[in-house]
Amino acid sequence: MVPHASAPYSSGASKSWKTRAEDATAQHTGTPPNACMNEFGPFKIGSLEVDPPILQAPMAGFTNFAYRQIVREYGGVGLQATEMVHASGFAWMDQQRAEHPDRLWGVRDEPRPLAVQIWDNDPEIMARVGRKLVEEYQVSVVDINFGCPVKQITQRAHSGSYLLKDPARMFSIISRLVKACHPTPVTAKIRLGCTCDQINACQVARVVEEAGAAALTVHGRTADQYFKGQADWNRIAEIKSHLISIPLIGNGDVDSVEKALQAFRTYNVDGVMVARAALGRPWLFSQIHAALKGDTIPDDPCLNQQRTCMLRHYDLVVERFGVAKGTHLMRKYACCYAQGKSGAREFRTYVSKAEDRRDFFRIVETYFPS
Ligand SMILES: Cc1cc2nc3c(=O)[nH]c(=O)nc-3n(C[C@H](O)[C@H](O)[C@H](O)COP(=O)(O)O)c2cc1C
């Protein structure tokens, strides 16, 4: 199950939104040296221009090739990310001349820009894998996961958010990786700290920049919060003044056009990253993009279009994973698409039992009628 974004799905959420031009009274708070080029303009990660300044977050188990393709078709994303990849696992497979990690499927051939996220705690292995991603996969960005709160990653592998306790190790991981990946930019994704008593994101931000990273993404929760409570955007905003020249990407609970605009206007981030809210609404990025340009915000697709999107998504997933695994995988996306809609509970009950294409299509067609 995906932890819910804070506000429930509302198919009409964006409709009440005025365009940027109409909202001329919005406050804007000055222009620090590392601000983006204009109020809502693109920003740079190294030499890569992120245009629009909206990023699709990495999500393990979700942001695979099929999902990225669906998001790309709606547009509105300046940079997409894979699921996190375990560097040691990748290095081992490579040494054995075994197939590369599943999570890299599609990465070689799909359009750019694309960031691949890796996790681990060994600077040398991370550097070796980073180099491979740059040379063999020509990725646009190598991102490091310093935010994952899952026990298997933190307690057992001393990686992810565990490393927030060890800025010196973060420094060596980033600096080795930057050297190995040059000129491809390396970025870091963190949380505010490990616990609310150990919030150290401002200090960590300095370490990240000094080690040579080209951007910092901050999820505004502590690791021990997992997804509880609300992302603290005031804390995210505080980090901005600790960065000298690299951009700050804010993340956490952005589930509407309104919240994305607020992130830029009130919290002065250079980029906004969206994760859970776009799982069942892959068109959200394009709505945010329209708002940033001052265009009229497109309505959510009608039920019929959403059905077409879900069925296309199904076919992409099955193309990759086969019918049995693909149908199984698609159940969780289908629940995301249904979130907040009338009959969602019943839909979830039925779709969670779908075993093949016929089952899946029949259930979807019942609840998302043409
Ligand atoms: C199912 C799931 C998987 C995730 N996997 C990753 C991951 O692989 N790497 C990462 O940096 N963050 C991961 N995250 C965290 C998200 O990227 C993001 O930081 C978090 O969900 C907050 O953003 P949101 O409120 O827009 O969802 C994951 C989140 C979820 C819900």
Image (spheres, helix red, strand yellow):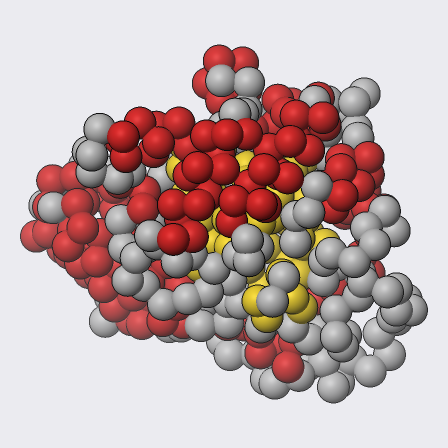
Identified at 46% across, 43% down, the residue is: 130
Residue 117 lies left or right of residue 251; in this view the side is: left
Numbered circles on residues, count:
0
Q: Residue furthest right?
A: 30
Instruction: Report the front residue among 115 and 360.
Output: 115
Quadrant showing the C terminus: bottom left
Placement of 131 over or under 288, stated as above or below: above
Q: Quadrant of residue 68?
A: bottom left
Residue 291, image x, y percentages: 63, 76
Instruction: Report the front residue among 19 and 143.
Output: 143
Residue 114, image x, y percentages: 44, 59
Placement of 314 over or under 173, stated as above or below: below
Residue 293, image x, y percentages: 64, 81
Residue 304 lies left or right of residue 85; in this view the side is: left
Identified at 40% across, 48% down, the residue is: 133
Placement of 244 over or under 40, stated as above or below: above
Q: Residue furthest top?
A: 156
